[in-house]
Amino acid sequence: MDIRKLSAITIFLCFSIPSFAGGYHLKNRFLDKLYSIAKDFSRIDTDYIEPQKYNYAVMLQNTNTYEIYRVANSLHQSVDLAPDPSYKIGPYFGWRWIFLGYTLDVTHLSSRNKRKGIDLSLYSNQLGIDLFYRTTGDDYHIRKIDLNDNQKIDVSSLKGVNFAGLHADIRGFNLYYITNHKKFSYPAAFSQSTCQIKSAGSPILGIGYTHQKLSMDWEALYDVVTNHLGPVEGLDKARLDSAGISVSRVKYDNYSVMGGYGYNWVFARHWLFDISLSASLAYLHTISEAEKQQNFFRFNKFTIDGIARFGVVYNNSKWFAGMSSIFHTYNYHEREFSTNSVFGSVNFYIGFNFGKKK
């Protein structure tokens, strides 16, 4: 399986603890206790949430991924970089609480782009988790640039120009708890394993961890600028060398605690609109290349990150269709180098359930 062509095998395990043990008497007390705990995780207020009536589901989904990086150096120069979006499409098959899917990246069928990514989201009534892994390719384009030059020259011609000097790698997870889980259903908005029949909201609490590596080649950026604009006063590699930022590299761990609120608005029969916003206080453990060689660590950074989710769903229990999205923001700031990044995906889907539960 060529991951360069597939970009990602997106697997959604959208779970709301099933009644797979329903109808069976568990004689062992320990297993009875575990089953009782599992049932409590899926306990809902049926005036607000309607449980799934079917065992199986088939779905066709289109996934569109986006990302953008803004990087700046100590010379107060900055550039916004983003690749072309990736458009993927593929079928999914679900059994009760498990959805397995296979999506083909139709935008990079014949390219040798090194971009890789996996996004995995799991939803239950009480708990949810996001797992993600992304490695950038070499297909970034300049979206905006500020050279902090004395001439204030027109840089509009640089918009859309290819740039291969940015390399980034991010992996991590977010784990969150839904406090009002008996009335508010994340699965209704993002996995269609339940139906929200009356509007409700809930505070959301969570923790997260990410590991990021990023490298920015400022000399390569200068080459791109001079190739398109000619020599620019005050813009030369000697300044980069004197500032010690010819190539900026950073590697850090991000530990966060988060809080937010989600709301499911049932604005018409079988229709649902969801919005969920969370902010996190993140503690950064940074390792520079010099410090790594000296086995020396610095613990000195706090920052604010965020997660946003949106969804619109039509679900009459038999047929469902809709749109969902999730976006992450991360920030890193040092005197020599700073970056702000946003990445996420937007999904469009249609499907139906079958095999009614007895």
Image (cartoon, grey):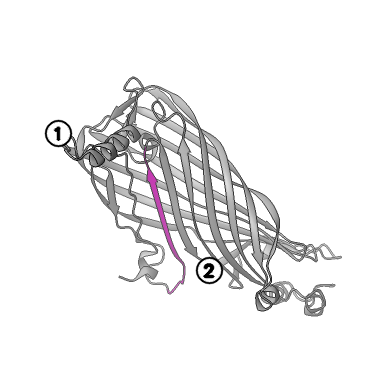
Q: Is residue 209 above or below residue 356?
A: below
In the picture provided, is 290 more to the left or to the right than 184? Answer: right
Choose between 39 and 174: the one closer to the eye: 39
User: Helix or strand or loop: what does disc 2 sit on?
Assistant: loop
**Horizontal and vertical percent position of residue 335:** 77, 62
| Residue at 33 percent of width and 49 percent of height | 13
Task: Tell me the SS state at disc 1.
Answer: loop
Report which residue position mark 2 lands on: 139
Is 138 left or right of 241, judged from the image as shown? left
Quadrant of the image occupied by residue 11:
bottom left
* 328 in relation to 271, above or below: below
- Residue at the location (48% across, 58% down)? 85
What's the residue at 34%, 23% (across, down)? 45
Give above or below for 121 relative to 189.
below
- The quarter holding residue 217 reads bottom right
The residue to which callout 1 is attached is 23
Q: Does the magenta-highlighted stretch encompass residue 148?
A: no
Residues shaded magenta: 112-124
